[in-house]
Image (tube, rainbow, N blue to C red):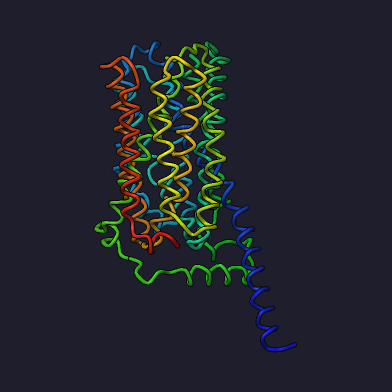
């Protein structure tokens, strides 16, 4: 056998071993994080369906609901960067467990709410508790995967977002209907209590299941650890920034934050208000509303996976954000023309949800293309913090506009316009850096 053929065989064997190691890492970590994100997002947005009973029972206005739903993001914004820096120092295992257990307990405690102030305080504390989970997982995945593999992996993790609505809509509607009046509590109260339990249990499981990094993974062989570490070392970009100040002062980080802001305003407008829009279109039964809200998210899961895989395969990022975001904007805008037609309303929001959701696995590949170490921890958290302001703005502005205009169309058109701004900002990113 020649030296050349031996070398080719050796390289091929190493490549196969590396792919096997990545398969082991993916099956171990990604489904678990997807479940965690499903639980997190469900606890965050179930207030949108609870609202259909909660407001009448407690006498809250649309503006009170919008402010309370939005205060979650104020707590989230204030503690996002510090939380991610703690995670980078303490390790993912303990910190993600802490996040999940505390947010589950606080979300469950929402069943005790009787006044607007109690609602405001608990929503704010829920944001404080959950701060750092999403950017923490984004950071944690960069400890395992090189840039060119991240879009597909991000897509698998982010499936938890549409799955929360796909599963959570019908489940929440069923809980609110089936448990209404049980032991003297309303359906919306049972909703908060029962849907908090998975978060707490998953948080406890983190303590034994989650390794802090490659070297701590007992289920990897020394050879697999070596191959994974070499793959990451070879992925470093020459112009990467490492320091904390480099992240906070980077124009690219702030630009990414504004792009994510435009995306998340639309996501939260749909997540928190779609049940209300369905009711306005003529659906009265809570369980049926839950089923209908699941339809857009079923399509979103397909779009998420396809767009993430396409972006990795073509090594292209910008247009894989711009095209689906534009489709999302069109879906939102067109939905305002069919407010009395439930079939067309569901169709347009399915198009919007699929388009917007498909952008996220590609978008979250971008920060780590020029940030490493403490800069990555702070930069990813800062981007998520800027976007979280969109959650507050979307929920409050749409609630206020509904009180003023007695409909949702003005707010939906506003957020569709924000998506178009996000498309323009995405094209301002340097192609040679992000398309890797």
> Horizontally, is 259 left or right of 209 in the view?
left
Residue at position x 48%, y 46% in the image: 97
Give left or right: position of 327 versus 240. right
The x and y percentages for residue 151 are: 50, 53
One can see residue 82 in this view: no
Residue at image point 53% right, 72% down = 230
Q: Nearer the viewer, residue 346 or 187?
A: 346
Q: Residue 297's spot in the image, x, y percent?
A: 53, 33
Q: Residue at x 53, y 49 (%)?
A: 207
Image position, residue 379 (x, y; %):
33, 55
Q: Is residue 170 above or below residue 419?
A: above
Horizontal relation, residue 436 to residue 383: left or right: right
Give the image quarter of residue 167.
top right
Residue 103, located in which quarter of the rendered image?
A: top left
Q: Could you tell me which quadrant the C terminus lies in? A: bottom left
Q: Nearer the viewer, residue 249 or 325?
A: 325
User: Which is more toward the observer, 163 or 350?
Assistant: 350
Residue drawn at x 47%, y 53% as measured from the top left: 92
Where does residue 334 sit, x and y in percent of width and height? 41, 27
């Amino acid at each position: 056998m020649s030296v050349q053929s031996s070398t080719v065989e050796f390289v091929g064997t190493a490549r196969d071993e590396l792919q096997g190691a990545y398969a082991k890492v993916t099956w171990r970590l990604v489904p678990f994080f997807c479940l965690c994100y499903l639980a997190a997002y469900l606890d965050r947005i179930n207030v949108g369906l609870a609202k259909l009973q909660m407001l009448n029972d407690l006498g809250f206005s649309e503006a009170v609901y919008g402010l309370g739903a939005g205060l979650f993001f104020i707590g989230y914004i204030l503690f996002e960067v510090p939380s991610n820096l703690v995670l980078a120092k303490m390790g993912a295992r303990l910190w993600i467990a802490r996040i999940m257990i505390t947010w589950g307990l606080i979300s469950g405690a929402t069943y005790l709410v009787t006044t607007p102030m109690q609602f405001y305080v608990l929503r704010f504390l829920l944001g404080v508790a959950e701060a750092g989970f999403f950017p923490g997982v984004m950071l944690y995945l960069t400890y395992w995967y090189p840039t060119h593999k991240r879009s597909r992996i991000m897509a698998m993790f982010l499936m938890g977002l549409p799955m929360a609505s796909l599963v959570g809509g019908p489940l929440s509607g069923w809980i609110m209907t089936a448990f209404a009046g049980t032991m003297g509590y309303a359906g919306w109260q049972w909703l908060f209590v029962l849907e908090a339990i998975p978060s707490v249990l998953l948080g406890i499981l983190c303590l034994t299941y989650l390794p802090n990094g490659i070297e701590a993974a007992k289920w990897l062989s020394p050879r697999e650890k070596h191959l994974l570490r070499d793959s990451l070392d070879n992925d470093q970009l020459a112009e990467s920034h490492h320091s904390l100040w480099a992240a906070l002062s980077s124009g690219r980080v702030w630009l990414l934050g504004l792009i994510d802001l435009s995306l998340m305003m639309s996501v939260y407008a749909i997540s928190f208000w779609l049940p209300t829009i369905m009711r306005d279109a003529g659906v009265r039964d809570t369980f049926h509303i839950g089923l209908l809200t699941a339809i857009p998210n079923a399509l979103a899961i397909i779009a998420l996976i396809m767009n993430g895989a396409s972006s990795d395969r073509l090594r292209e990022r910008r247009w894989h954000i711009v095209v689906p975001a534009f489709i999302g904007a069109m879906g939102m805008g067109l939905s305002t023309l069919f407010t009395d037609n439930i079939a067309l309303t569901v169709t347009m929001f399915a198009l919007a949800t699929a388009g917007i959701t498909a952008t996220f696995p590609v978008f979250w590949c971008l920060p780590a293309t020029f940030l490493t170490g403490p800069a990555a921890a702070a930069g990813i958290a800062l981007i998520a913090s800027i976007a979280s302001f969109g959650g507050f703005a979307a929920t409050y502005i749409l609630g206020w506009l509904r009180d003023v205009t007695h409909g949702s169309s003005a707010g939906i058109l506003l957020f569709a316009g924000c998506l178009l701004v996000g498309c323009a900002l995405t094209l301002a990113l340097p192609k040679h850096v992000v398309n890797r």
